[in-house]
Amino acid sequence: MNKMYPINFSHIGITVPNLEKAIEFYTEIMGWYHISGPIKVSEHNKDNLSRISKLVYGKGWKSFSFAHLSSADGMGFELFEFELNNDAKTTSNSFNMGLSHFCVQHPEPAVLLEQIVAGGGKITMSPQVMYPDEKPYIMAFAEDPFGNSIEVYSQSYELHNVGPHGPKK
């Protein structure tokens, strides 16, 4: 068997009830780049995006709009607004299958939390030192205006997780 190598993360996609508001939140609060969109896709069109969307979503979705954003390190963030979505907030939570949260890195999590609140989100866990006796790394949790859970680390993922609580051999 060939040796497996880590695969790069390309992007994450989330559905929101208001695409324009989500673009505004993630570009103004997170500082992410707005690459393209909104792009409208209709189930009844014959173009390539509609064809691919039918393969992905099946039948009955009518239409959706989406946009592409990117973080400073090139991680893609795709936002969707489906015509048939009636939810004002996410229905996802940590106890059910599916996306639990996404995490961003900021050297001062409390500062980012203030910006998230100013942008219509809320704090769900104030900044905490993860391992006070070992390392001063901070983590916190918030929600965007649509209820999507955002974790905030002060340091990289690897630094937060290496050590006695890190990788198993």
Image (spheres, rainbow, N blue to C red):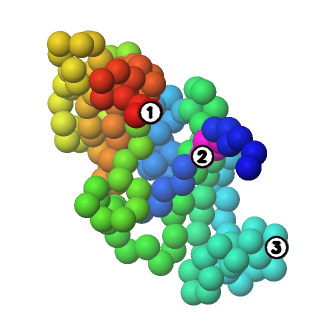
The spot of residue 128 in percent (x, y) is: 19, 25
* Label 3 SS: loop
Q: Is residue 61 above or below residue 157?
A: below
Give the residue drawn at x 44%, y 49%: 21
- Label 3 near label 1: C-beta < 8 Å? no
The quadrant holding residue 59 is: bottom right
- Which residue is labeled 3 in the image? 47
Magenta span of residues:
7-11
Identify which amino acid the numbered label 1 is placed on: Lys
- Which residue is labeled 1 in the image? 169
Left or right: residue 156 versus residue 115 is right
Identify which amino acid the numbered label 3 is placed on: Asp
- Which residue is labeled 2 in the image? 11
Give the residue drawn at x 33%, y 62%: 92
Between 130 and 139, the one lying in front of the other is: 130
Q: Nearer the viewer, mark 2 or mark 1?
A: 1
